[in-house]
Amino acid sequence: MSVTSPTAGDAQASLSPSRAADFMQCPLLYRFRVVDRLPEPPSPAAVRGTVVHSVLERLFDLPAAERTVGAARALVEPQWEQLRAGDPELEAMFTDGEELATWLAEAGELVERYFALEDPTRLEPAERELYVSTELDGGLVLRGYVDRLDVAPTGEVRVVDYKTGRAPSELFVAKALFQMKFYALVLWRTRGVVPRVLQLVYLGSGEVVRYSPQEHELRATERKVRALWEAIRTAAGTGDWRASPSRLCDWCHHQALCPAFGGTPPLPPADAVARAGGAEAGRVPAPGRDET
């Protein structure tokens, strides 16, 4: 039986930086997450990332003079409670109250480290948690959420992304910047302005990585994204989602189903081809927060 690839006009033909990164890391992981939609248990590290991001978003609700370390740390527990209220199962990550308290303290330390990297009293973000999307010729929709967008009075744009992990080595900087160039491409296509600065704030190691993209680099990013999409279409059409073993497999929740570890993937769902289009109606849930 033949299976057709997702059509160019399919409303579900969309791609986010995280799902693009999944496919580049391992096509089978992309299938498990996007096509099979297999559940993944939340991890304390990923959920902590979500809490820290929420705190840094809410921090800018305060008047500039009140954006202090103490005020920021005071937001940690309420943001956790709000997240937990939406998903009571998150509390099962912790064996007891002491473990939870330690986790909350670690989140507070990451929030405090932010103040050594930026002075929030001198910033007035134009946007926070900004949903961006654009449709390329051919129908592929690029979408994602930008942590913060700063716009200078003269119009220059800075794209800021918070990471609660450590800054990567020089060998892996390009991989980290792909996400930012993806966002820059979408913003360029929608606003007609190439962002002046792409800024990654690594709270885990207390470092900031800045990059100034050029128009030709964003065109190259678009070509790369199109190539990725064609590879996804091919995998969807043939059913050939190959595993790509690496050190990152140690953190994968799906080893039991992976052929590289002696497992057998489940039968694909009836609408597998349509699902391969990467439909993502909203925010990646808490477990999807980057820790890199």
Image (cartoon, rainbow, N blue to C red):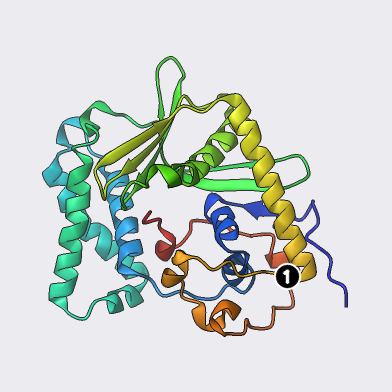
Q: Amino acid at mark 1?
A: Asp
Please indicate whether residue 75 sits to the left or right of residue 16 in the image: left
Question: Which residue is depicted at the point 64% across and 60% down?
Answer: 278
The structure residue drawn at horizontal position 18% and vertical position 37%, both measured from the top left corner, is 116
Q: Is residue 174 left or right of residue 233?
A: left
Q: Position of residue 82 (x, y in %)?
A: 29, 62
Residue 93: percent from left, percent from top: 29, 76
Left/right placement of residue 263 relative to residue 125 reads: right
Pointer 1 residue? 240
Q: Residue shown at 66%/39% (left/top)?
A: 222
Q: Residue furthest front?
A: 171
> Quick one: SS at disc 1?
loop
Please identify the quarter of the rendering in which residue 259 is found: bottom right
Q: How many marks?
A: 1
**Residue positioned most to the right:** 1
Label 1 neighbour load within 10 Å: few <14, some 14-19, many 20+: few
